[in-house]
Amino acid sequence: MSSTADQTVTYQAGSARGMTIGVAAVAAVALVLTALDDVGAALRYVPVFAVVPAAVWAFYGRPAVIISDGGVALRNVVRTVELPWPAIQRIETKYALTLETAYGPYNAWAAPVPGRTGAAYATRATMHHQPESAYAAAGLRPGDLAGTPSGDVAGYIRRRWEKLRDAGFLDDPVLERQRPVVHWHPGPLLLVAALVAASAVSLSLG
């Protein structure tokens, strides 16, 4: 997680960042090696080398969960949804980090639950010291475990949400809007689509 002085925290899964950097590095090396052999071919195949890194960035490297004094913003693949604290009713982690709100449920693409292998590495220590609200409803899930993408960000959101609740700020929540603020950003998908089309042309030209 990265934070600023005004208590804004941006969460992106470390594995997603690592995968994005790794794929981009492999593509860059492949492009350089191709250029050493044939500069013209390297220039022609730039879209081919770029399409996979662009897709990994769009689907894994770019999504984030942004927590601020005003609420939680879920930046997913094609849209960002801003959810104010008074609208948030429960934090779930059954399939991914999911905020149950007065507007309905919203999932975080950046915080998936761990697979069986990830859950198997959980220890007793990771199950202790969880926020009180984590034990509500169905109790602790694998997605609540510390050290997992969903568990780390869910725990942080729950602690900030509980502080506001315990201070009385959520006793009689009033929503300023009937729907949450949504920002659409089709750019990443359009970039990937353009690179796919350009790659097809490059490959057809040989």
Image (tube, helix red, strand yellow):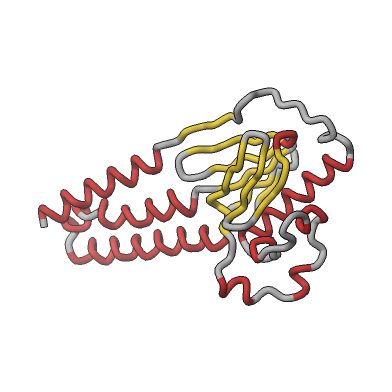
Q: Can you give x and y, in whole percent of width and height, for residue 149 in the image?
A: 61, 60
Q: Residue furthest front?
A: 137
Q: Residue at x 80, y 56 (%)?
A: 131
Q: Is residue 23 left or right of residue 75?
A: left
**Picture mark count:** 0
Q: Residue at x 57, y 72 (%)?
A: 116
The correct choice, above or below, for 15 with respect to 60 in the image is below
Q: Can you give x and y, in whole percent of width and height, for residue 155 in the image?
A: 73, 55
Q: Nearer the viewer, residue 125 or 199?
A: 125
Q: Is residue 108 left or right of residue 195?
A: right
The quadrant in which the C terminus is found is bottom left
Q: Residue furthest left?
A: 205
Q: Residue furthest right?
A: 167
The quadrant in which the N terminus is found is bottom right
The correct choice, above or below, for 146 with respect to 136 in the image is below
Q: Nearer the viewer, residue 190 or 93?
A: 93
Q: Nearer the viewer, residue 29 or 80?
A: 80
Q: Is residue 90 left or right of residue 46?
A: right
Q: Residue at x 65, y 36 (%)?
A: 83
Q: Is residue 115 left or right of residue 43?
A: right
Q: Residue at x 66, y 52 (%)?
A: 92
Q: Can you give x and y, in whole percent of width and height, for residue 164 in the image?
A: 83, 40
Q: Can you give x and y, in whole percent of width and height, for residue 142 in the image?
A: 65, 66
